Amino acid sequence: MSAALPQPLRFQLGARTLFSVRRRLATVGWSLDEALAGEPSALPVLAPGDHGYLLRSVPEAEAERLAARSDMLAFVRQRYPRRYADLSGSFDDYMATFSARTRSTLRRKTRKFAELSGGTLDLRSYRGAEEIEEFHALARRVSRKTYQEKLLDAGLPEGAEALAEMRRLAARDRVRAWLLCLEGQPVSYLYAPANGETLIYAYLGYDPDFARHSPGAVLQIEAMREVIEEGRFRRFDFTEGDGQHKRQFATGSVACADMLLLRPTAGNRAVIAALKAFDGAVEIAKLFPLQGLVRRFAR
């Protein structure tokens, strides 16, 4: 049976998808350990009707090797530093990786949020199967309000199937989750499944009504404290993509790319040509007065 599934190749402006082209692709992703080791790919065999591969977090050297394959069409859609935090030391060691100004800012934000809670942070931790069900119900209240869910379709998953998967992982002690609450109500959540000794940054969100109090940053730093003090995990993987939050809390990174490898058919050549032209036009627009228009449309 083929490992490939229909996948939308999106033409996007920021968070907005203008349109998409579907291709039957086998998705292959690299774990953080594999990316750090620069491990070569083990791509599944394609069935006759499959179009190719969607590769995520490919280490830079492996991406270059795959792009040189003569039997496939290669297109790198994005390059980025895959950021992670080293959890092997003490919490003080972790804090020492920040600048003095950042340490002061994080402590001030945490102190001010605690003052809103009557002097003590209401931080709730979840890991067991029954606990994760409670977490899911409360975190979904917050997720519905977030821009991740409203604009990116990337909120905390809902429904029986998503909850069953969370319970399965929790039953095997393969998940950590947190809620930051204010006056008994959740205002921010963090969900991190585990892959061996690595925790994975899967879902973080906060109620936009409390954005001025930086609940996401407060929750992240306190979650890092708990994880480091637990001593089980070696790394916190901030996964693909980049952003200010990931840059702030990471201690290292590895150069990675997301790319397509498609069979050299006329249809696939046309798709890659269109993607290249569109992505190139968006990058050029950012350099000129159209930048403001693009940004407004992308919101």
Image (tube, helix red, strand yellow):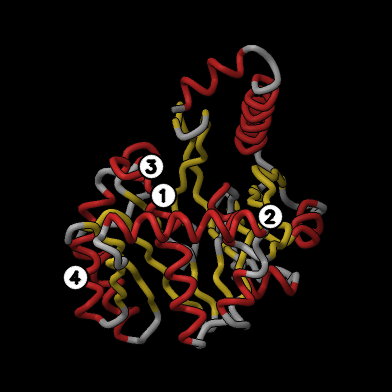
Picture quadrant of residue 103? bottom right
Please give the label number shown on residue 212: 3
Front residue of 214/31: it is: 214
Q: Amino acid at mark 2?
A: Pro
Task: Identify the residue under disc 1.
Answer: 214
Q: Amino acid at mark 1?
A: Ser
For the residues labelled 4 and 1, the Cα–Cα distance comes to 24 Å
Q: Quadrant of the C terminus?
A: top left
Look at mark 2 in the image and give the residue it sits on.
Answer: 81
Q: Residues within 10 Å of mark 4 (few under 14, many from 20)?
A: few
Residue drawn at 19 percent across, 64 percent down: 160
Residue drawn at x 49%, y 61% is: 107
- On the image, the x and y values in percent for residue 278 come to 62, 26
The answer to the question of whether label 1 and label 3 lie on touching residues, with beta carbons closer than 8 A, is yes
Mark 4 vs mark 3: in front: 3
* Residue drawn at the location 29% of the way across and 64% of the way down: 119
Closer to the camera: disc 2 or disc 1? Answer: 1
Residue closest to the eye, 239 or 5: 239
Q: Secondary structure at mark 1?
A: loop
Residue designated by label 4? 134
Mark yes or no: residue 158 visible. no
Pointers 4 and 1 in contact (C-beta within 8 Å): no
Residue 195 is situated, as x and y percent measured from the top left of the image, at 50, 78
